[in-house]
Amino acid sequence: MSPRARILSATLVLAVTGGCGRAPEKGTTTLRFWAMGREGEVVQELLPEFERQNPGIHVEVQQIPWTAAHEKLLTAFVGRGTPDVAQLGNTWISEFAALEALEPLGPWVERSAVVDSAAYFSGIWDTNKIDGALYGVPWYVDTRVLFYRRDILAQAGYDSIPSTWAGWRAAMEATKRTVGEDRFAIFLPLNEWLPAVVLGMQTGSPLLGANATRGAFSEPAFRRAFDFYTGLFASGLAPPVSNTEIANLYQEFGRGYFSMYITGPWNLGEFSRRLPPELQGSWATSPLPGPDPGVPGVSLAGGSSLVLFRESRHHEPGWRLLEFLSRPDVQLRFYRLTGNLPAHVEAWQDTALAADPRIRAFGEQLRHVVPAPKVPEWELIATRVQERAELAVRGGVPPDSVLARLDRDVDRILEKRRWLIERERQRVETADRGTP
């Protein structure tokens, strides 16, 4: 069954709704731009300037809820109704590139005076490359750092987060002694896969092996990370609960139920709004510790990218829109409107970013990020990681057994991928032999 047919059988056609902005004048090229969530609302404030600088181009924005975006994009692909330009979560790039839905951007970048790979965080840029080809340009970035109670850590004898796992573990043990039996050093929600995966990335685990066709979770690198992760629960440093089992995350952080939490930039604003005034000077952020001395703690490369769809008839004006939204000054305006961290490194020189130590921790971490495995099945695999990790923590199942089961789960998920790769190998061999 072809990719189009598989997707068609798995999705329902969604009605195309909305559109906004003034009606274009006669003779104007109209670009259809799909953007998600609040970004789709806010980006419209930037577009009058683009249209002023690019007479003859009108941008029609369609705002799509994140909950519906993936299915709507797939449905548009099947129905040959994709937009010209779209915002795409960078973990979706591999899926749409595999479907040959996206325009390769390498030739456009080579000719561009605005977009340059050297001007971006390398790990973020890499999320947009599949098999050496570039399919997206980073729009805004996302990663995870450690939020922590600076006052409680000081009571435990530390003025900052240590840079190694051993030091971090010692700081957590000191924090636990300080806060007492009914409180914890760190909160690692059991319904989130990211902490276990990021720790595995830090030890150099590829997560997937054999050309990304099998799980590599039983291998020594991930096993080391998994032992560190589960040990935090076994030692009483982390509560064995999910975030749905905590009434209010911000209140619990404020009352010291936990003192550390791995999370992303959206919580900068949430912590500022939700914590009481007397605690506003008591929390801070830090890049993640690394497993060994001299080894930076990597985190996950996340965020959203801008893409051109292959079937668009307006690649040139679409690329001009990508260039406009990639400019450092425009990215700074977008940051001020949304709080989304800019992808362009030059924008980080602005005082609003450089002078805030809580934001600066994200800038430091973004220099040490790696992408998730670039396979369309990754989100399903990540769910299996979370389920198996929870089994180890709540169910007391030995790590060897849990990771072996996880590898078997992943091998089943990637069975189709192995078949396709083998089929392609046989096709190439047949062509090389000149067999009709």
Image (tube, rainbow, N blue to C red):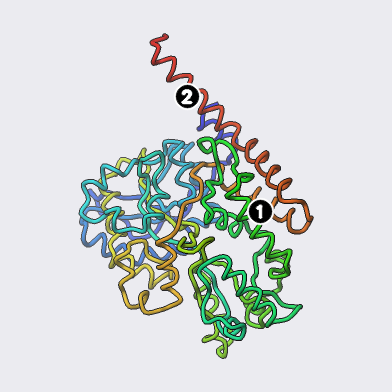
**Residue 169 in the image: above or below residue 82:** below
Label drawn at residue 12: none
Quadrant that contains the N terminus: top right
* Residue in the image at 42% along x and 50% along y: 127
Residue 143 seen = yes
Mark 1, secondary structure of its residue: helix
Give the labeled residue for mark 1.
Answer: 386
Give the labeled residue for mark 2.
Answer: 424
Q: Please tell me which residue lies in front, 23 or 109.
A: 109
Callout 2, which amino acid?
Glu
Residue 347 falls left or right of residue 55: right
Residue 168 falls left or right of residue 405: left
Quadrant that contains the C terminus: top left
Determine the residue located farthest toward the right in the rendered image.
395
**Distance of mark 1 from mark 2, alpha carbons?**
32 Å
- Which of the marked residues, 1 or 2, is nearer the chain's N terminus? 1
Q: Position of residue 152 (x, y in %)?
A: 61, 83
Determine the residue located farthest toward the front in the rendered image.
293
**Residue 37 in the image: above or below residue 399:** below
* Residue in the image at 40% along x and 61% along y: 367
Q: Please tell me which residue lies in front, 193 or 59.
A: 193
- Within-10-Å neighbours for mark 2: few <14, some 14–19, many 20+: few
**Residue 261 in the image: above or below residue 278:** above
Callout 1, which amino acid?
Gln
Q: Please tell me which residue lies in front, 282 or 140.
A: 282
Mark 2, secondary structure of its residue: helix
* Residue in the image at 66% along x and 53% along y: 386
Q: Position of residue 196 (x, y in %)?
A: 61, 57
Q: Please tell me which residue lies in front, 147 or 264.
A: 147
